[in-house]
Each structure stands twice: as C-alpha cells, then as structure tokens.
Image (cartoon, rainbow, N blue to C red):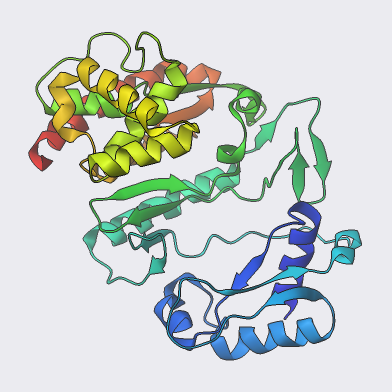
Amino acid sequence: MISVAVDAVHTALHYPELRVSCSRRNGWWHETRRYRDADFTFYNVVPAIDALLDAGILVDYDLQPAGRPTGVQSSYRPAPWLAEVTLPDLRYEVGEVIRMKDVNGRLIDYRDNDRTRRDRAMLAKINRSLAEADIGLDVPAAIRDGNAIRLDGYAVFPQMTSLYRVYKGGWDRGGRFYGGWWQSCRKVHRKHLTIDGQRTVELDYQQIHPRLLYGISGRHLEGDAYTISGWDRDVVKKAFNTLLNTQDFEEARGAIAKNLGTDRATAEGLILDITIRHLEIKSYFHSGVGMLLQNIDSEICRQVLVQMYRKGIVALPVHDSFIVAERHEDTLSQVMRTTFETVAKTAKKLF
C-alpha cells in the first residue's frame, strides 16, 4: 500500500494527467511475476488499490472486468492534492534487466538461456559502474525538485542510472538498452551532461540501419541516405524507418501518411522516391526487417559498453550513440568503429 501511495504522489507531482493501470486478472500477475518483487501479487496489490480508492487517495477509477485478457487494464489517477505531499529521497531499483515483450509490446515470461545469463551478468557490472559515477547536468535553467530535475517542459530522475535490455518477439528482435535518465534528456540538453565533473561528448552511428543494409547486401552507401531532393531530411528519415518496420506496402503507405499527417498519394510518392534512391536495398522495404536491425545495433551497443567498461571508462548509451568524458573521445571513436565492422560482418550470416 505504501508503494502504491508513493507512486501516486510521484505521479501527481510529475505526470498529473497520467492514468496508472493495474490488472485485475490474476493470470496477468502470474504471467509477469518475473518483473516484480515477490510481494507484489494479485492478492496484495489489488486490495491495496481498493483501500486507497476508498480513502480518496486514488480517484477516477476505470474498472475493467476481470477474466479473459482484453488488452485494456483497469486504471486510476492520483488525487490532485497528492501533488502537495513532500516525498523523501527515493531509491530506484531496476528489477529484471532482461525483458521480453510479445509483438504487441506486452511483457511476457521466458526461460533463461546462455544469452540472458550473459547479459544479466554484464549489466550487473555496468550498472554498478554507472551507480558509482557522478552523472550530472550543467544546465543553468535546470531546477532540482526533490527526486527530479525539471527542464523545459519535462523532468528527468537522476536516481535512474541502471540499464535494462528489451527484446520484442524473440531473441533476434530488439534488444536495445533503456533505463538511464540521460536517455530522457533532449539532445540540446544532453550536450551539457557531465561525468565525474568533466564535460562530455556524444558520438553516434550516423545512418546505422541504411549502412547495415548496404553492408549486408555487399554494397556501399554513397552520400547521405536521407537526403532526397524535394523532401525534408527528417521526413525522409522517419519514412525510411517506417518502411523497415512494416510488413507490406499498404501498411507502409498508411503508416507514413498517418505519421506525417499527409494523404496516401503523398506518402506513396515519398515511398517511390526513397525506393529509387535505394534500389540496391529495396527488397528490405516493408519486410518487417526493422526489429532484426535493432537487434544488430543493440549487439553493437552491448559490445561497445563491454569494451569501454573493460577500459575503466563510463559510457552512457543512447541507442545508437554514446556519451563519454571529453578526454575519452578518441578511445570511444576507435571502439565504435572496430565494433561496427566486426558486428556488420557477422550480420551478413543472418540474412
């Protein structure tokens, strides 16, 4: 009950419009028990929520019927007055660091294997080094507010230094690293991060998925993959990624039109121009290859993190980029380059 109440206070303070969901299906609690402390069960949490609702601490309850899974859980909001409650410093615990989701994004259980045991041991070491590092944010406009740092219209939580890895639909899909509070910082603010009081630099793998696909196809990417005459570069980049993450042309056209807020004819024209620009890899468009590519770039990330850890250097991952103290820029650049070449060669065997 205390945990639910503290979460409600935290939500009221930082996300007042957010609804907090809670399943009333006993099977859900059994299926996802890997991801919670053993005390958080259907028979403990649901009665605690009911009691807090009766007390007026939780409000606006949307009760969904128990029984078969519907994809929609019961949800509530914290009482608005909770935003006036002062919380002590909170300790954040990441829990299970290897997470598996189904194709719809729901957490599911799995059997441990050599990969999960390896990754869990690796993350234990890296998370320990991240917890010991002094990761700061030197932004004059930043306001420290209890457990949060408030920036321009959003907040980050410096206690969140532990990374976890998320797969989606299989061990060869997804696998990216999440959880570090610096990942929630906008790029304009990330350049003001500090590590142990030192200024930092962020290096990224530019156009990583186009480069991987060209390499897998035995071709060389000429120029910028997202620069196409008549189109904004960011628009092309979003559409290109959509082409990789959809299963057929109709889905791709509809998704691009929706994402860009345009009509299907315009989306189709953009798809045609991207296809003409990238004829060498057009067979991968609307093939659902995106999650496989994420798995490859997550493996690149894993190896970079491991190598930097072995060198005693703290590296903060942001999917396809890394942040280190400025004095380690050359080391990071070299590690990133050699790791990409090594993993890219291995990736050819997967296609």
Q: What residue lies at 74% left-to-right and 68% top-to-bottom? A: 77
Quarter placement of the N terminus = bottom right
Quarter placement of the C terminus = top left
Image location of residue 293, percent across then percent down = 26, 39
Q: Determine the image quadrant of residue 303.
A: top left
Image location of residue 67, percent across then percent down = 47, 88
Q: Visible in this render: residue 319?
A: no
Q: From the viewer's perspective, tell me whether residue 115 is left or right of residue 158.
A: left
Q: How many labels, in total?
A: 0
Q: Is residue 81 above or below residue 332?
A: below
Image location of residue 58, percent across then percent down = 78, 75
Q: Nearer the viewer, residue 188 or 228?
A: 228
Image location of residue 215, percent across then percent down = 16, 24
Q: Determine the image quadrant of residue 290.
A: top left
Q: Is residue 16 above or below residue 261?
A: below
Q: Nearer the viewer, residue 32 or 89?
A: 32
Q: What residue lies at 9% left-to-right and 22% top-to-bottom? A: 218
Q: Visible in this render: residue 89?
A: yes
Q: Nearer the viewer, residue 312 or 108?
A: 108
Q: From the viewer's perspective, tell me whether residue 20 is left or right of residue 253.
A: right
Q: From the viewer's perspective, tell me whether residue 259 is left or right of residue 335.
A: right
Q: What residue lies at 78% left-to-right and 68% top-to-bottom? A: 78
Q: Nearer the viewer, residue 344 or 8?
A: 8
